[in-house]
Image: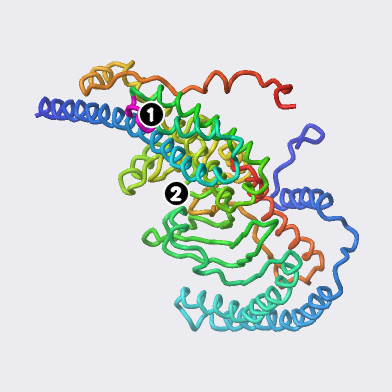
Amino acid sequence: MEFLIIIGLLLMLLYWMYARAIHIKNRAFEAASSIEVQLQKRRDLIPNVLKLAKKFMDHEKKLLGELTKLRVRANSAVSGPDALPKGLELDSTINRALGQFFALAENYPDLKSQVAIVRAQETYEEVEGHIAAARRFYNSAITDLNGALETFPMSFFAKMVGAKKLPYFEANSDVAAPVNAEDYL
Amino acid sequence: MRSSGKEEPLVYGRRRKQKFKDYEKLNAVVMPKEEVVIPPYLAKIIDSFEQRRRLKNILFFMGATLTVVAAFFAYNSIPDRGLLATILFGGGYLSYLPLKMLKKQFKNSLIPQILSEYGFDYDQEAQGVFPSDYMAILPSYTWSNLSDHFWGSDRGIKMSVAEARLEKNFGKYTLTVFDGLLCRFDYPKMATAQVAVKSDSGPIEEVFNGVFTNKQRVRLEDPLFESKFEVYSRDQVGARYILTPTVMERLIALERQHNGLRAIFRNREVLLAIPDGPNLFNPGNFIRPLNRKMVQQFHQDVTIMKAFSDALKLNAKTKI
């Protein structure tokens, strides 16, 4: 009888570890897709912003054209956790261009006074906050995933369900680079 | 404390006296001994209530004395000691009732006047002021009493504060599960899903929390925050959007002052549940003479409430 109880408990433990490995793997996928959802939100902002800007920012055609191209490239990019690092790189370029756009918009009082552009800027800031949150969620999920893959016996079950190590999200090198005040003065 | 080599016995009364001395020392810093200058209209209210209080106080002592005398003579004729105790308690309560009602009238006359200086409104009753979604952050309870509700806007931030006392029946026993303040403030960010932050209850309760609610545990990267709080939400990204590293730091700092702090973020609002909050706008025991210094104390109560909003930097323009 005792033997059966021990076997039963052991089977339960093994099942729990198997289920946990699946949960950890799915959580990593969920985290990766949540970044993509937030990035898509930012990309969806571009057409609305451009529509407004075209009326006022005739001299910034190069930047507006670049934003359109970047959006097309990002939308056609492959999705999924494996493609995430490349996607993030592309989106950081979009982010830079959008940031530059809003900075330039300050020079156009007619554009700046448009309610729609004010709202777009607010949405942009909100989306930026959500992207940062999604990245934190992703890193947290990856910590669990990589931890499971490195610790026995969870590593056995993690490999069994097809989980593999994923890279952490790290800030771009240009973000970490020291700021030269002269560039802005 | 040792004196001349002999250990001085600890006498309750002496220890209590020492406590009062310490309290006076503390008060000497917070409240100066000199006469507090208060606006004449407030002084008029306090003085008129003091006259009425004296009369009711005499009635109270007469009623209480009569009850004790009646109980003394009825001691032998009422063999049921429980009934006798009920009569004593009932008599005492009935004698105190006029004073209690006067206290209520006094608060209704004085406090709205003080709070109007800050642009706040006041109501002694606060039952049903906070939606049930907010109350879910509190420990489970079977009886609740919300009072001393004041609301208004401070530097553009809408706030609503009330005192709450929650009790729960455990068979024969009733336990106070929460006695403190509930503060609702505007929050500069929109919470896409409800985010509940409660003090860390240990691994066993955490398992039950996860099983019996459909909210997910949100594990954040700050180990200090994780050691003090548990976060639950249906939206992992939304919870992190609200609880940025800066907000986590602010909540930790607030928790250091108010152990057992709980918070819930919903839409563009945050509700703080502060277990050891001060007893707001308490004019004290009406058996003692009314002191004009209480006005100063009431002003301090408002300042404390505003300090909670400052601690979370709710009026900051940046949404970090």
Task: Quadrant for residue B318, please give it.
Answer: top right
Q: Amino acid at mark 1?
A: Ala
Q: Chain of mark 2?
A: B
Provide residue A105's location: percent of width, then percent of height. 62, 40
Q: Amino acid at mark 2?
A: Thr
Residue drawn at point x = 46 percent, y = 29 percent: A91
SS type, badge 1:
helix
Q: Is residue B117 above or below residue B314?
A: below
Q: Is residue A125 above or below residue A163?
A: below
Residue underneath mark 2: B192
Region rendered in magenta = A75-81
Provide residue A168's location: percent of width, then percent of height. 43, 22
Q: Is residue A80 magenta?
A: yes
Q: Is residue B285 magenta?
A: no
Residue underneath mark 1: A141
Q: Nearer the viewer, mark 2 or mark 1?
A: 2
Provide residue B88's location: percent of width, then percent of height. 56, 77
> Which of these two is toward me, B180 or A160?
A160
Question: Rounded to the nearest whole Å, what is the CA distance between mark 2 and mark 1?
Answer: 20 Å
Marker count (numbered): 2
Q: Which mark is residue A3?
A: none
